[in-house]
Amino acid sequence: MAAGEKQQVPIKPGLGKDTLWLVKSGDRVLGPFNTAEVIRRLRAKELVVIDEIISPQARWRHIRDEPLFASVVDEIRTGLMTVRDDTEVGDSTGTPTITARGVNEDGTPIPVGQTTSVGAATNARFDSSFNVSRISDAEIVSETDDVEHIHVASAREIEKPTARGRSEKSVPKKNVHSSLAYTPPGKERKVDSAVIVTKTSRALWMLVAASVVVIGASLYFFKIAPVKRAGERSEEIARLRKEGDRAWSRAEFLRAQKLYQQINREPHTDLETDLRQAILQLRIEGDTLSAKRKLEDLVPRLTSSEARTRARIALAVASLQADEPLEAQNALMNLVREPDAGPIAYFNLGCAQAANGLRSEAIETLKKLDTHPSIGGPSRLLRALLSLKEGNTKGAVLAVESDLQNNQAAFQQELHAMGAVSDWLDGNKKRSNQRLRLALDTDPMQTEEFFFDPLLYLEAIRWKQLLPVVKDYTNKSKSNGAKALLALALIKSDRRTEAQQFLTESLSPRMNDADLQSVSAYGLMTQGRDDEARGALKFSQANQTEGVSSLAAILDARLLERASDRDAANKLWSEIAKRPNPPVIALVSLARAESQVATEKSLSGVERLRILYPNSVLVQKLHDEIVDASQPQPRVGAKAAP
């Protein structure tokens, strides 16, 4: 081929020298360039064959894979093999040069040997026997299976041919891929070892610091924080349990139930809380089915024999509530044969036997509880009721003898009422009237202010169970006192409408009867009609010549407390406390008033009340209010008794 001829480049159909290209070099997108500009930049080392290129309506591909540039890519690859290291010319510090091949006006390469010689500085001809391994200062493209590695000399200058065929040194251009620079043998770059050590040390220290932070954070979040949260939850559960037990001891069962439910939302191992919640769910909420399932699940898990006994009693009570007295009786019979069976099991067994019609067996079972300090009263009351239903008036009279009545403040009104009925039916009308007077002068709210374990099945001695015998007694006696007792029984049995109608009929012939008016005031108070209750009490006190009745005075003091008139209520309670057989609330109010004057006297008075009425909720609250408050600085680890 002639030296002046232009080398033709095969052009892909649809593509030519006017085609516009975008080039992706590293993280930059260059262009658009026409074909000639791309070829020029390839020869000028501004682009490399592994850069990506795209034309309109095409996809990104490497320059080496575009057929239009195939000849240029081959030229670059083969041309590098023609480079020889010219060491014969120049001084010892000179740098051999490689003259680039010429380019025609249309951008096509001029073949080697036409216009430019390799090694122009010495006019040396190309030696085909030149050893490729001696090349030390040229860009070498070495192909592997998948990647081409570009090595660029950084210490030599690239000579460009001038228009006259002479080579002159051009300013070396910045290599795009400087990170892939190639250093010729014998000219390795010198690196300061101190800098490397410093950077390495800094990196190591940063790595150590980051590791310490990560380990510390992991230790906190996975070890310390869970333990801390567990400790806080444990303290909170202990506090809730203490409040729940306090509410339980004060017969505040609804509040206790809510506290136990709150405890059971947290993980805990306190099965006593689960047991108490199940008992309250059974007795307070009346959810027999769910409570029974919980109790059946708890029985095998409880480790204490006492706790298992209570759970089994609760299951028997669930059977009683579900009108299955025979199942309850069988369960309780098995339970009382065990040595650790308590008085609650015996009382509930008597209730189950009575529900099954075994009244004589129930009476014999209940006799075992006569001297019990807290269950003796309910037991004697149930015995009297069962004896009356059996027609055994003597047995009923013996059950409610007065030798234990003074110690039974709870169920005192019920015991006096059954005593009046029993004595009347037994023919002792004088003592019947005496007991009737005691029943009417007793605080009607006193029994409800005493604590009784929810496991006690007290439904057998509620006023609605006493109502039939009281009604029979009233029909036979026909006295105004008996009518007042019947009205009281109707009110306590939640039959207020019937009670009000009966009182209206009974008061019409005698509007100034103190007992009927007092019971009417009590009925109005239970409905929240306090103003009408005050009017009934004033009407009952108008024609009394022997002073105000105890029932009227008690109700008047309670109305003053409900109106937040504490001074007037305390004054009236102090007067009532001086009367025979005063109500517990009067004694508690007097002790509270004395505590504001003499501390030593008040403390001894509260302790005495606690001995006399250990199950009184009012006494318990007074003890917490006065005795605990008198010890503001307890010893470390010490705590006042609840």
Image (cartoon, grey):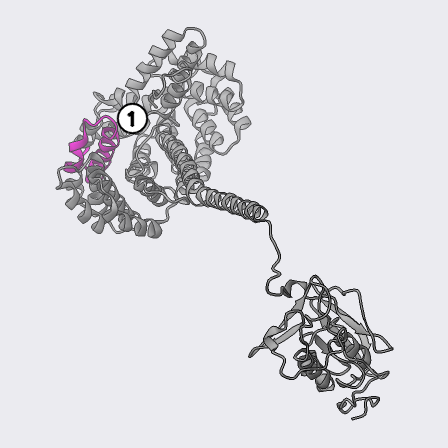
Q: Amino acid at mark 1?
A: His
Q: Say if 62 sits above or below 426 in the image.
A: below
Q: Say if 422 sits above or below 464 in the image.
A: above
Q: Quadrant of the C terminus?
A: top left
Residue 69 is inside the magenta segment: no
**Residue hosting label 1:** 416
Main SS of the magenta part reads helix
Q: Secondary structure at mark 1?
A: helix
Instruction: Pinpoint residue 494: horizontal percent, then vertical percent.
Output: 41, 39
Q: Residues within 10 Å of mark 1 (few under 14, many from 20)?
A: many
Q: Is residue 339 left or right of residue 373?
A: left
Q: Tell me where residue 486 sits by quadrant.
A: top left
| Residue reaching furthest to the bottom | 1
Residue in view at x 32 percent, y 15 percent:
607
Q: Say if 83 sits above or below 397 in the image.
A: below
Residue 505 or 128: which is nearer the viewer?
128
Residue in view at x 80 percent, y 87 percent:
16
Residue 170 or 74: which is nearer the viewer?
170
Q: Say if 549 sits above or below 91 in the image.
A: above
Residue 392 is inside the magenta segment: yes
Residue 362 or 34: which is nearer the viewer?
34
Q: Is residue 329 left or right of residue 132?
A: left
Q: Which residues are magenta?
A: 364-393
Instruction: Pinpoint residue 46: horizontal percent, then vertical percent.
Output: 75, 71
Residue in view at x 74 percent, y 64 percent:
174
Q: Tell me where residue 514 sits by quadrant.
A: top left
